[in-house]
Image (tube, coloured by chain):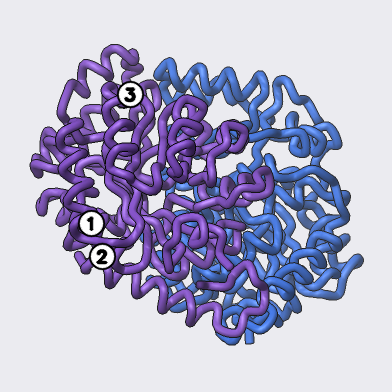
Chain colours: A purple, B blue
Amino acid sequence: MNRICELFGIDRPIVQAGMIWCSGWELASAVSNAGGLGILGAGSMYPEVLKDQIARTQAATTRPFAVNVPLIYPSIEEHMATIVDMQVPIVFTSAGNPKAWTQHLQSHGIRVVHVVSSVKFALKAEAAGVDAVVAEGFEAGGHNGREETTTLVLVPAVADACTIPVIAAGGIHDARSTLAAFALGAEAVQIGSRFVASRESSAHQAFKDAVVQAGEGATRLSLKALTPVRLLDNPFAREVWSAESGHATPEQLATLLGRGRAKRGMFEGDLTEGELEIGQVAAALNDLPQAADIVAAIDRGYRALTAGMTDPHFAWP
Amino acid sequence: MNRICELFGIDRPIVQAGMIWCSGWELASAVSNAGGLGILGAGSMYPEVLKDQIARTQAATTRPFAVNVPLIYPSIEEHMATIVDMQVPIVFTSAGNPKAWTQHLQSHGIRVVHVVSSVKFALKAEAAGVDAVVAEGFEAGGHNGREETTTLVLVPAVADACTIPVIAAGGIHDARSTLAAFALGAEAVQIGSRFVASRESSAHQAFKDAVVQAGEGATRLSLKALTPVRLLDNPFAREVWSAESGHATPEQLATLLGRGRAKRGMFEGDLTEGELEIGQVAAALNDLPQAADIVAAIDRGYRALTAGMTDPHFAWP
């Protein structure tokens, strides 16, 4: 019995991260149809776009899916009303106080998961009543904590501190890293970069190609003075790094970042001026498979690696 | 069959990291007597001290042990002559070019392992003929790479790239993280911080206590402009961080660091002015056990976690 599969009503404890500009209905429905949990990344969607994306997802799959909502989203009331009205079964919240929306959503029968990067915030999320937490490490492409705690250190610490189930995120892309996450106490994995580099991701083809070509050391945790995010090396990222090493103020960084950079980079494929967010595991990715094949390969690989294991924690549904 | 146990002639694929000021003969011999591989950290030893420490280790154990030599050590010829003369069976080199000494040591029947933080340097070490590599991630207390690649991302990448066996380091302190490392492709683990916080470590009691008390986010990768190292929060570390965020030059940082800071902090227990190096897992450590109990707990825990597993990679000797 896997508590995350039980909680979400899914077959495989594999969650596709909700990522701005990369995870629309094609990706989310493909992952859900493959037995995992697909997530729409609502942080980059206008209210009308989210409605449309939910409708398309519901048309493309009868399986559970989720919406990721950064709690700092400006029109969050509209997003939450849409989610309740359209009967989205699961919401992942991030970047904000989980107290604000958890009980409201749960009162409508919605499961709520909050993304954290520290034990401190995991305990706050548990106290707010969330059903599970995503513990996301330093190596991830987003939701990075200022403490820089890596997945290997963060996941067991959160699993020890909380009684609700923990979903591990950051640096996970295959069966080996999934088994590592389970060894550390996780009961599911959330995978981002691997699904950015998939056929169904809504990332621009040029960005997908850049992810596949990324080598060792090609990403760096950046913009810690604003909201920390891991940037892929490109001319814009170099401008940021140069400003940061020159002791730029948060205001100067905000000006440099400007508006619409992430869309320009990840959705429109401007590899020069655009902001490209991706995890360290980009260095390990060499192809653009179908999302269902990613899920199936992890499922198959995990079963092979753990064949014969008797510890029930490692049981795969 | 575990290639690292075979290579070193040890019973358990558990290596105690060679750490300046913390790993003298008491710790190294205790770990070797417990079936792991104890390592003397020669980077903080004068040539006469290393001779004495090797003699004491040989008097305290008949099992294999190693010496860690940073290749930037000023009197390295003396250290290497001592190692050959006193028939040390295994040498771990770090911080330098493995070409310089590998063949010389091997010609005297000594096994050579090099510590790396990237695939690029792992391949260079393999080409230089080393017998194994330690792949050490961002979360570690030392030997950190500028790319900031975490253990979870680094270990599988190095294991895929090399044919020689890989020892995982950084963030590992118990059976769960050891299993995670094996899942990622490692054939042994190198553990530092957990052994700093042990009865036999030569760290000052005040430093040991500070490690045990360290909480989440208490360490930070520092001094990247000189040699990257992970510092535990204390007044000296805050001076460094303040200088770094103020865009200090490498020369200014070197002046601030001065001489003898690490000894002052870790060996003499000056928690104000001393340099304290430790890994992120310090946050998970709550006691000061005997080294043999650390080895035994990992051994027992790993066997319990993997009971029944049929994949030979996870077989524990």
Question: Mark 3 — residue?
Answer: A244
Q: CA distance from mark 3 to mark 2?
A: 36 Å
Determine which quarter of the picture holds residue B280. Answer: top right
Residue kind at label 1, given as amino acid type: Leu
Q: Chain for mark 1?
A: A
Are dots 2 and 1 in contact, CB under 8 Å? yes
Q: Secondary structure at mark 3?
A: helix
Q: Residues within 10 Å of mark 2 (few under 14, many from 20)?
A: many
Question: Mark 1 — residue?
Answer: A27
Residue at horizontal 17 percent and vertical 62 percent from the top? A199
Q: CA distance from mark 3 to mark 1?
A: 34 Å
Left or right of B188? Residue A300 is left
Q: Secondary structure at mark 1?
A: helix
The image shows residue B197 at horizontal and vertical percentages of 79, 46
Are dots 3 and 1 in contact, CB under 8 Å? no
Counting residues from the start of the chain, the first of labels 3 and 1 encountered is: 1
Left or right of A193? Residue A156 is right
Closer to us: mark 3 or mark 1?
Answer: 1
Are dots 3 and 2 in contact, CB under 8 Å? no
